[in-house]
Amino acid sequence: MGKQGSPRSQSALRFLDGLTNVKKLSFTMKNCQNRCLDAGRRTFGGNCSCWSKRILLHGLKNDKTHLNVSKGTSSGKRHMMLYKHARSIIFVFGLMGTFFLLNSLIISIVHCLNLPNGLQPQRKVNILQDDRIDVNVEKEPRVMYKRLLNLASRALAKNQFRQDAPTLWKEPYKQASAWKPCANKLDPSKQGETMKSNGYILVSANGGLNQQRVAVCNAVAVASLLNATLVLPRFLYSSVWKDASQFGDIYQEEYFLNLLKDDVSIVKELPLHMQSLDFKAIGSLITDSDIMKESKPIHFVNLVLPLLLRNGVVHLLGFGNRLGFDPMPFKLQRLRCKCNFHALKFVPKIQQVSSLLVRRIRKYGATRSLLDTQLLGKFMPSVPLKQHDMSRGPSKYLALHLRFEMDMVAYSLCDFGGGENERKELQGYREIHFPTLLARMKDTDTIFRAPVNENAFRLPSPADLRKMGRCPLTPEEAALMLSALGYKHGTYIYLAGSQIYGEKSRMLPFTSLYPNLVTKEDLLTPSELAPFRNFSSQLAALDFIACATADVFAMTDSGSQLSSLVTGYRTYYGGGHAPTLRPNKKRFAKILSGNDTIEWNDFEERVRRMIEEGQRVRLRRLGRSIYRQPRCPECMCKMQ
Ligand SMILES: *[C@@H]1O[C@H](CO)[C@@H](O)[C@H](O)[C@H]1NC(C)=O
Ligand SMILES: *[C@@H]1O[C@H](CO)[C@@H](O)[C@H](O)[C@H]1NC(C)=O
Ligand SMILES: *[C@@H]1O[C@H](CO)[C@@H](O)[C@H](O)[C@H]1NC(C)=O
């Protein structure tokens, strides 16, 4: 998914047919193309997001060529010359045609995109209501909110030539900028103290990149708590992530050791004489079933310390989510923040390619913020390398973490309007992957028929689940949210995450509203991606960086670890200028339940209020993750 080839654009166009007229659209596109290619993005009041799906992407791709060329191959230079030539020719012709037609053009676009509901051609209805979809065959758009989508389409057409609302790329609350990074402050009580180690702690962290990150920083805190020496954490190989990367493949080891050297003792390897120990046999193996989720520090003192003192070593295996957030001594909380926000730096290999990625999507080659500096280090120049960058400034982009993967969709037990075929497909998936869930479902079925046992676990119905806000947002819902907030049709959107369930059929409603959607696979060449191919965690690091450095970051699932860590990072380093859009699924479901009647203005207003609610500046609440909500005295300092 995520490829920007023309098939998608074609069907996206067909999808828009109901609102436009193909002839006019393609005519518009040609003119637009000329203007876009030459006059740059500044035509049309600062944004050449003309009606072209292909064109803008084309522009983006060209920029890629551009960047490749600047790497200096001579054939590349020849290409460049030709390209520039062609551009000038197109320009001259374009100019002649364009000015002539400009007036009638704008009028016709606006006119044809404002067709009242009743005037929509029949054909579109057919596309949208076709239920005879074979799940395995090339798909038609799968749409749940036809009416809202049409309204969104029209609203985007109307907004096309307007200035962006000033709030669009900003955080709404000024107080956000009062909070500054603070976890790096040295702890005076620790200075010069020689710690006697109670033994070694070995950690083998499971999960993907982001779970591991949390595990590493929790391990640092536990080692400090127990006056133990931490062995550089190991990452377990999992059949899901299929990535053998170790700590040093993802994070800069020396930097990590050095930054934390005054806080906790960390070594790279267990001493030789301990390496051959059978941890299980000596009782030093502690798995996740031995410790409760989000345990208090005292549990570690009671359970782990005695073993540590007896055997000189313990092995924490898995270590997902085992250390809670409250209560927690100030010092340890700060240490976790220092670890997460300061000590973990991605290796140069990741920084370098991420910097390419970010430069290409921004079309700009210099550091813009503290977030850039922290994440990309020396690989992002501090001043623009190219003259035109300086005059033009970077393109804004929105990064979207869209969580609509098959396993999530199947597990949710929600209904996504895909009819019988989709239900069967999801049920088939559950049979293979979630047998226990299925067993529960069977129980529920019998309960519905004959409610004998009052205490039997009852699964909520798909409609209830939706009301409760338990259903992953579809790409369509994400697009509706963005359009309600006023993001324009031409907005550059970086899509993070993996395989979208339903792929094209699910993405079409999204790309019809927002065609300028790119992924790392679009922005990087196969050879640039090759070193990351077999390393899903390293690929995830690219997504992490592209999301954290985005002008706006939008998520569809606040429970996801990537979204959560990126949010925290943007809060910590964003200085109040790194907005994050976090929909409240329950509230959004309520808004969407009126999809057949709600006025577009009303929809916009309610979505905006929902998002602003999520952006309120408040202290981290009790029990909440400091990695996601670092606004607390342990991590950040509030300026008066
Ligand atoms: C760790 O060391 C500090 C200071 O040296 C001491 O106060 C604390 O009791 C020790 N904790 C453990 C669990 O050994
Ligand atoms: C990735 O793994 C495949 C099979 O496991 C192997 O053939 C290929 O060479 C690997 N590629 C890289 C870049 O390591
Ligand atoms: C859309 O509106 C219809 C009619 O009010 C309603 O029955 C349906 O549940 C709504 N869809 C969703 C997903 O909320």
Image (tube, rainbow, N blue to C red):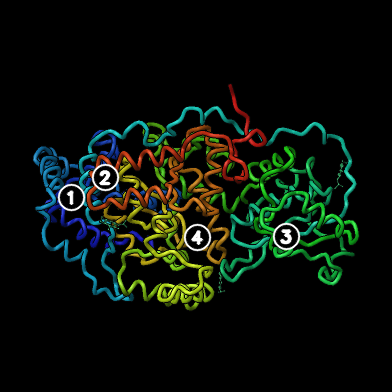
**Residue 437 place in picture, x, y as percent:** 51, 72
Neighbour tally class for label 3: few under 14, some 14-19, many 20 plus, Cα within 10 Å: some
Helix, strand or loop at disc 3? Answer: loop
Contact between marks 1 and 2 (CB within 8 A): the answer is: no
**Residue 382 place in picture, x, y as percent:** 53, 35
User: How many numbered marks, from 0 up?
Assistant: 4
Neighbour tally class for label 4: few under 14, some 14-19, many 20 plus, Cα within 10 Å: some
Contact between marks 1 and 3 (CB within 8 A): the answer is: no
The residue wearing badge 1 is 30
For the point 59% across and 40% down, the residue is 621
Contact between marks 4 and 2 (CB within 8 A): the answer is: no
Identify residue type, mark 1: Lys
Query: Which residue is at the front of the view, 255 or 348?
Result: 255
Mark drawn on residue 291: 3
The quarter of the picture showing ligand 1: top right
Outermost residue toward the top in this view:
640
* Mark 2 CB within 8 Å of ligand 2: no
**Residue 253 place in picture, x, y as percent:** 71, 51
- The reply, left or right, for residue 629 in relation to residue 412 is right
